[in-house]
Image (cartoon, rainbow, N blue to C red):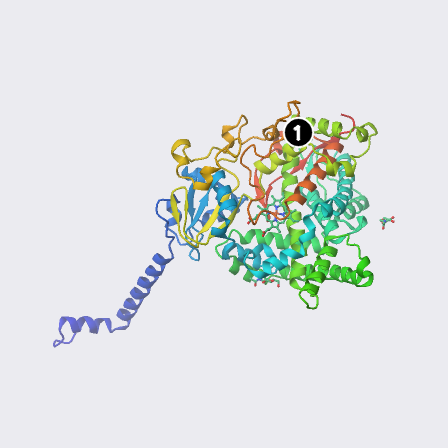
Amino acid sequence: MAKDLSPADALLAGIDTLPGKSLLAAGGVALSLYLLYRQALPKPLPGIPFDEESAKRILGDVPYLQAMKDQGLAARMFWPEQFDKYGTAVSQYFMGPTQKAAVALGDYREVHDLLLRHGKDLCRGPLVASVWHGVMPAHFIGMEEDNPAFKAAKALGKDLMTPSFLHEVNAPASYQKVLSIVKLWQFKSELAEGRAFDAAVDLGYLTYDIITAAALNIDDNDTQIRKYIRELGELKQPATVPASTTEPAEFPPSELTDMLSALFTIAGASGKAFQVPSPKLFHLFNNRTAKMKKAYHDRDTIIRSYIGDAVRRLQEEGDNFKPTSAMDFIVMREAAAAKKENRAPDFYSDTVVQVTFGYLLGGQDSTHATLSFLVKRIGANQAVQTRLRDTLRKAFPEAWSQRAQPPLQELVKAQIPYLDAVIEEVLRIDPPAVGITRETKKEIKILGHTIPKDTVLFLSFMGPTYTSKGFLPEKTGEALRSESSRSHAGAYDVDDWTKSGYPADEYHPDRWLKESEDGSGELTFNPRAGPFLTFSTGTRVCWGKRLAYLELKLVVTVLVWNFVFERLPENLEDWVYDEDLFMKPKNCRVKLSSAWDV
Ligand code: HEM
Ligand SMILES: *[C@@H]1O[C@H](CO)[C@@H](O)[C@H](O)[C@H]1NC(C)=O
Ligand SMILES: *[C@@H]1O[C@H](CO)[C@@H](O)[C@H](O)[C@H]1NC(C)=O
């Protein structure tokens, strides 16, 4: 060191050497990284419980979701399960550096009140929008209600949930397809020699056949199940039957048609997008895979070819055009809208394609989930199943005495409270959508907590108050509820299923029945018995709810009429959840025998 240098100079000279410089630079980088890191860490809202560990990492609760996936569990159970973790009705979670703290609400009355009476304070929000925009941006499901495109897209499907369409198009189309699965399962159960076999795949084909039949007027011969029956019939040995009677028989699945494959692929991508910090980024990358590209291509070309058929018939038949499918009605709506707006019809637009596809997507995966849960529940609850079968035989005595199938026309109109209860109860205990996400359009109060504008809300449809005891204290809790929630206290027989005579976490259709008021002692279905939000409520309530109920009614009736769903061997009975777009049972097997002899 030179002798005439001051200590300060010496220091400066010292750091002017190469290692010194890089040390300082590294320090600077470390400091800015540290500041960035601090900036990126979750910022909890005051007073709302959260996971302490998650709050210390940039990715927040995301690693937890990933761990659930790695274990083969339904990652979405993270949302309804967090209330139990902290013992609260309101909690918060962190979805990584791109998102602010999000708030979860697990209390039936407040969720119901928010959706039904405060819908204008909430919106779909950019997060959910980006999930849907990533796969079908022209469908209304991802749009805000004040977007003019929302109304226009929704108007295209206006006829599809009317009683006349449901009864005249959906019901007959569904009925034929259910009779096909009866054939398939008679065939399979014979080959299975008393063993259980997987039902999830077959029910997936069934719900696809049903919705495509109504959407596109597919010939019975061209359905996935008929194709599957033909394929199995051509095999020398379609079933692999294990020596043990408690192990399931195995059947090869059918080869998927391009359309069904596209549907599964796009449904799967949407389901995953709900569970990542940035659905937009996820889709951006995922969209580039060959599988996704093929799915979009097949979706668009196949639907456009059906549009072409409908347009041709409409143009040829003019005023005599008789619509027989969802596609026909959508094309007619586009023609009418164009006329009204004085423009040329745009039959092949993305909107027409994606509204049609949304009908297939919404109609397939959701009812598949419910039917998969349902066959498990009635297999595990033999008394329920026997009572349902007796009830159905009494409802259609002529068909039963003639050993015929239940008559479609009567079935569509029939009011059978026990059937309704069996279906409602599976939708309650195994809701395919565990909850929904909204965003706040302004600052709001939830159970005493101030929630800022632009906060993501998870509104739960299962867990506390639905399938377990709620966490709001009975006495002090009431004062925390919103004014409109308090003024509607008592609108339901119970606001927490643990207050009913039936355990909240058990399958009891009876909870939905009450004696009719006319004193006849007859039981009626009681929709106000207690917490239930499986189809959501308010302005964005499930668009396909009526179709879902009709389809479930038809399918369950025909299946229980024809088959006994026997109790599974203990080693095959489990209640583990899995997921696609909707939540499903991880294993769905049936062990069938004929119901004609019991
Ligand atoms: C068991 C069957 C079903 C369940 C549990 C179910 C559940 C739901 C739920 C919870 C929502 C609300 C989402 C939200 O508020 O953000 C929803 C919306 C929707 N559902 Fe369903 N659904 C079922 C069947 C169907 C069927 C059969 C269709 C059509 C064929 C359908 C089409 C739709 C559409 C288009 C929306 C969006 C509505 C909008 O954006 O305003 N769903 N469904
Ligand atoms: C993914 O591709 C589909 C089909 O081309 C498109 O509609 C969608 O906007 C794309 N999403 C993203 C995030 O690029
Ligand atoms: C359906 O397919 C079977 C067997 O391939 C054939 O015999 C029958 O004629 C077909 N029916 C219709 C309506 O196309």
Q: Residue at x 41, y 38 (%)?
A: 88
Give the amino acid type for the residue marked by disc 1 in the picture.
Answer: Arg
**Residue 277 left/right relative to 575:** left
Quadrant where the N terminus sits is: bottom left
The quadrant in which residue 501 appears is top right
Quadrant where the C terminus sits is: top right
Which residue has dot 1 on it? 567
Distance from mark 1 CB to nearest ligand 1 atom below 8 Å: no
User: SS for tag 1?
Assistant: loop
Q: Position of residue 65 (x, y in %)?
A: 48, 47
- Regarding residue 82, the answer to whether it shows in the image is no
**Residue 413 left/right relative to 38:** right
Q: Position of residue 49 (x, y in %)?
A: 38, 43
User: Looking at this view, is 190 or 280 the one in front?
Assistant: 280
The quadrant in which residue 429 appears is top right
- The vertical placement of 472 against 163, above or below, is above
Q: Position of residue 110 (x, y in %)?
A: 47, 41
Count every numbered label the image shows and give the total: 1
- Regarding residue 222, the answer to whether it shows in the image is yes
User: Looking at this view, is 65 or 467 the one in front?
Assistant: 467
**Residue 560 left/right relative to 94:** right
Q: Residue at x 68, y 56 (%)?
A: 356
Q: Position of residue 43 (x, y in %)?
A: 37, 52
- Are there few (<14), some (14-19), or many (20+) residues within 10 Å of tag 1? some
